[in-house]
Amino acid sequence: MIVPETMLAIDPDAPGGPEVLVPVERPVPVPQADEVLIRVAAAGVNRPEVMQRMGLYPPPPGASSILGMELSGEIVAVGDDVPPEMIGQPVCALVTAGAYAQYAVAPYAQCLHVPEALSMVEAAAMPETLFTVWTNVFERAYATAGDWILVHGGTSGIGTMAIALAKLFELHVIVTAGSDAKCNAALAIGADHAINYRDEDFVARVKAITGGRGVDIVLDMVGGDYVARNIQCLAEEGRHVSIAAQRGPEAAIPLWPVMRKRLTLTGSTLRPRDKTFKGMVADELARTVWPHVEEGRLKPVVDTVFPLAQAADAHRRMEAGDHVGKIVLTM
């Protein structure tokens, strides 16, 4: 395949508001030995990219300054360690950076084949949330069928994927959201219960829903003062998993309930993890989750699709907080 030398990409020179997200010309990247070059069809939009644009979340050392952590497209070139027959294959991939562009490189081990059941827009909306939810809910919190899980931000990209995966693997799902409309959207997606945290005390509601027992897992992206309240929601042997800290990185931990109920407090960040770890996760997803994707039983919730030239509008929608599911850019 003929690959051009330059491409359009979203690569701001300096931090700022959404207005800094304008397409600029950049060299097409060259794949390393274990990488593939993908002609990008679509890229998912994620909150860490909003933080990076604002100068609050710099990319890891050595990563591209081009925004974007997930994409879908067609492989057009491969590194020396990748089978040449992969050229022409449709894939989606988790990347450290570089997805908001016409071309991007991805580690071959982090690519998943795009089946006929998925559109390229849907495929681009899956990797970041799928890797995040799987590693935190099913690996770190070792979720099993019959568990109860509380998910904050139930209509976010992470929240909607958590609902979908939880129902696929027979968990009971309680979510919180900031309006009745969002609660209804979460219920329509598959949540068993939805709590409007602006109108109700989610701790009291969780206890009422579970008959006083509490939930087995809390997936928390809020942090701050939510942590102590989450601990009140946990049943004996419960697991609290932190994946973000929107209300602050500091939390007061009440130790007596942690000890009395034998709780586990854990968490993770995905972006800084190395290729070996992410490749292992991709392999596990290919074996355990991707068959459900291929058969059409697991799809992301897509909120809005913008062309690359309107990346600023995509970030504005993300910051407004009105979206349900994933926002996607198309090339």
Image (tube, rainbow, N blue to C red):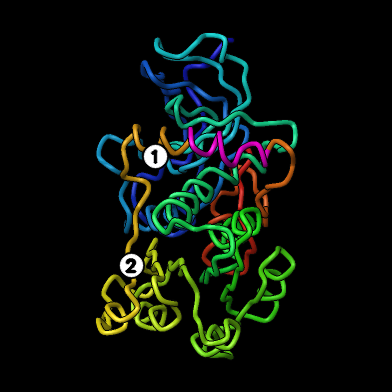
> 145 or 31: nearer the eye?
145
Q: Quadrant of the N terminus?
A: top right
Amino acid identity at mark 1: Thr
The span picked out in magenta is 283-293
- Disc on the earlier residue, 2 or 1: 1
Disc 2 is placed on an element classified as strand
Q: Which residue corresponds to mark 2?
A: 264
Near mark 1 (Cα within 10 A), the count class, few <14, some 14-19 or many ≥20, is: many
> 193 or 115: nearer the eye?
193
Q: Which residue corresponds to mark 1?
A: 96
- Vertical arrangement, residue 101 with respect to residue 127, above or below: above
For residue 195, side relative to residue 64 (left or right): right
Dominant secondary structure of the residues highlighted in magenta in the image: helix
Residue at 39% of width from left, 19% of height from top?
A: 34
Q: Quadrant of the C terminus?
A: top right
- Vertical arrangement, residue 174 with respect to residue 100, above or below: below
C-alpha span from label 2 to label 1: 29 Å
Residue 224 locus on image (x, y percent): 33, 77
Residue 273 locus on image (x, y percent): 32, 42
Disc 1 is placed on an element classified as loop
Residue at 41% of width from left, 39% of height from top?
A: 97
